Image (tube, rainbow, N blue to C red):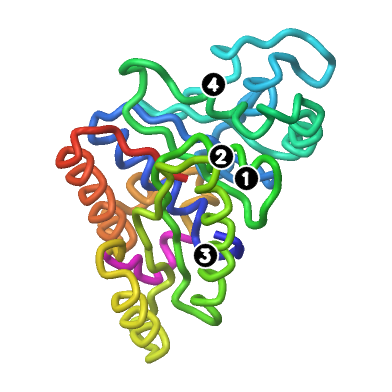
Amino acid sequence: MAKGGVGKTTTAVNLAHDLALQGHRVLLVDCDTQGQVARFLGVTPPYGLYEFITGRDAQGNTVSKREAVHPARDNLWILDGGIKLVELKYWLGEQPRENRHALLRKALVPKGDALDYLIFDCAPGWDLLSVNILMAVDEVLCPVALQGPAIEGLKTFFQYLISAQKLNNPLGLKYILPTLFDRRTRQSYDLYKKLKRLFTKQICHPIRLNVRLSEAPSAGQTIFEFDPRATGAQDYRKLTRRLIDDGIRAQQVPRFF
């Protein structure tokens, strides 16, 4: 999404953990300079995406890909983001023009069956790192907050997606995930109905507004650890089930950001 505050990191972390809980091997890549994924999971990786891609740390020391990938839970590994991604964007910009947009795909997308799911948690906005992410995925999951100008944010994102599809033809918008669904307000219901009309195939069960979802990161836990009976846990389980079922039907591994 082009807009912040729609639940991208909350969705990425909880989806990744629930997939891992179901026995799937998941790599979650934090592509935001805020570096929220590690905080949400309560871990402190020494390295991350910058070292994974460049092969070195800030001091110029060699870092292997294995060292950069940090175990966060059983079946769940992360590549940390954070402020070092500013340097990564500069580094990408210095690479040969003809392949700089596809470096993440070359480095990250695994061969064979090493992973079941590769999930990117993206920052708002559009830059060379965003382009690299869209070159590395086939399917997009787009959270949309059922508050304020939700549809306007989608329009901006579609412009990005259309541009990226010129370089990555298989890329498609697979899921629209309504978030911050407040059952007390008419606005949430109206926006949800509108999204259902516009995106009949892509629309997912909404993630209800739930204070436990916002409290869990402070404890360094996912909603499934913090309060597995919360409505947020129920809603994300439904999302996980849909993704798994769709993957089985398609007989292929879906990748998301």
The residue shown at (47%, 23%) is 71
Residues at marks 3 and 4 touching, judged by CB atoms closer than 8 Å: no
Of the numbered discs in the image, which one, if any, rests on residue 6?
3
Of the numbered discs 4 and 1, the one sitting upstream in the chain is 4
The range drawn in magenta is 205-214
Identify the residue position indicated by label 1 in the image.
130
Tell me the chief SS of the magenta region.
loop
Identify the residue position indicated by label 4 in the image.
69
Identify the residue position indicated by label 2 in the image.
133
Tell me where residue 46 sits by quadrant.
top right
Residues at marks 1 and 2 touching, judged by CB atoms closer than 8 Å: yes
157 relative to 201 in the view: left or right: right
Label 2 secondary element: helix
Label 3 secondary element: loop
Residues at marks 2 and 4 touching, judged by CB atoms closer than 8 Å: no
Amino acid residing under circle 3:
Val
Q: Label 4 to label 1, Cα distance in Å?
A: 20 Å
Of the numbered discs 3 and 1, the one sitting upstream in the chain is 3
The residue shown at (47%, 53%) is 10
For marks 3 and 1, give the one nearer the viewer: 1
